Amino acid sequence: MSPRLSASAPLDYESEEESHVPERLALSFEVIPPRHDADAAKIDRLLEVLESYHPDYIAVTSSQRSGWLEGTAAFIEKISQNTAMRPLAHLACTAGSRDELIGWINRLVDAGVRGLLALRGDLPEGGMPEHYLQHADELVRLIRELESHQAARFAAGRLAVSVACYPSGHAESKNEDEDFDVLLNKQRLGADFAITQLFFDAEDFLRFAQRAELAGVKIPLIPGIMPMTSLRRLERMGQLSGLTVPERVRTQLAAATTPEEEYEIGMELTAQLARTIVAGGADGLHIYTHNNPDITQDLLSRIGVSNDCLLYTSPSPRD
């Protein structure tokens, strides 16, 4: 009998040269609902570019500037009416009470959603109201309960339910084992896959994925990739996520003498991160687009992703 390994045991994983690379890379994008006064032509171009890659789904966040879930639902309606992309909506426990969440789930499904990313959301000042769902696993359970009562509505199909995971650790977790316990509970309650939150090192994801497997996680873990276009943006996103930008990344970006050089360094760092992850066993990538089609296209080109058939080729490093 093989010895049982701890989820925190040290692991070895294949190098980029030794590993298998998938012929077809699962691909998804994250977009932000535009403000009401946003340039319609720019939004149309964004959707046109993203659709050209035939993504497996397009995740739509919610934001204050676009009216929270009202803006999410409106943007999903536009995506459903004007493209063939499958929308997945972010839904957080902070959006309302249990009954209000049920109302939002129905509204989002009516708008064209067939998948939800179940999140707790950022805690409001004073903490979560007592009559709200307190954690994302409770929201996963609610989605599955609602789905079971509306089987005819989905032609006996299912909603895709995604959850978040944290390769660099959740800020509120006591240790890594707690992160895995939370993820395992989400899996048990019906999560189909998990999308990682922000991380800066490929090693963080690869080790997290292998330890998650040892802990019993069976659902796919999809790495979320954010283009590292500037040190200022990285520091801001790191602060929002409770993460520190690694010194090696900070040093390389800080050495740039022009914004153009900083962009070039950051994009190559991002592409290298993504290539290493794919070479290490990831079968998909989730790209945080920040609604910028040009940066998204540039990054995918550097990674080696073609919009012909989502074929992955290992590009030669740029000079």
Image (cartoon, rainbow, N blue to C red):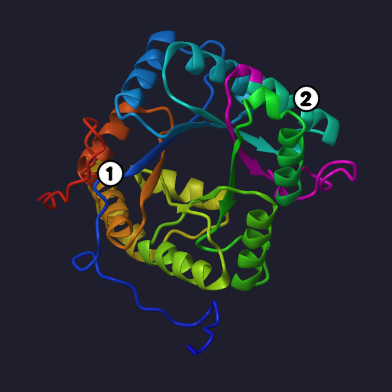
- Label 2: element kind: helix
Q: Which residues are magenta?
A: 110-136
Report, in whole angstroms, how far the alpha carbon at label 2 lies from the one at label 1.
37 Å
What residue is disc 2 on?
103
Q: Are marks 2 and 1 in contact (CB under 8 Å)?
A: no
75, 82: nearer the viewer: 82
Taking the spot 13% from the left edge, 53% from the top edge, the residue there is 317
14, 124: nearer the viewer: 14
> As drawn, is 40 to the left or to the right of 294?
right
Taking the spot 50% from the left edge, 17% from the top edge, the residue there is 80
Q: Position of residue 83 (x, y in %)?
A: 42, 16
268, 254: nearer the viewer: 268
The amino acid marked with disc number 1 is Arg
Of tags 2 and 1, the one toward the viewer is 1
Q: Position of residue 129 (x, y in %)?
A: 87, 43
Taking the view exactly as shown, the residue that stands out farthest to the right is 130
Up-down relation of residue 127 to residue 48 (above or below): below
What residue is disc 1 on?
24
Q: Quadrant of residue 122?
A: top right
Taking the spot 42% from the left edge, 27% from the top edge, the residue there is 291
Up-down relation of residue 195 to residue 30 (above or below): below
Residue 67 appears in the rendering: no
The amino acid marked with disc number 2 is Gly
Q: Is residue 104 magenta?
A: no
Residue 291 appears in the rendering: yes
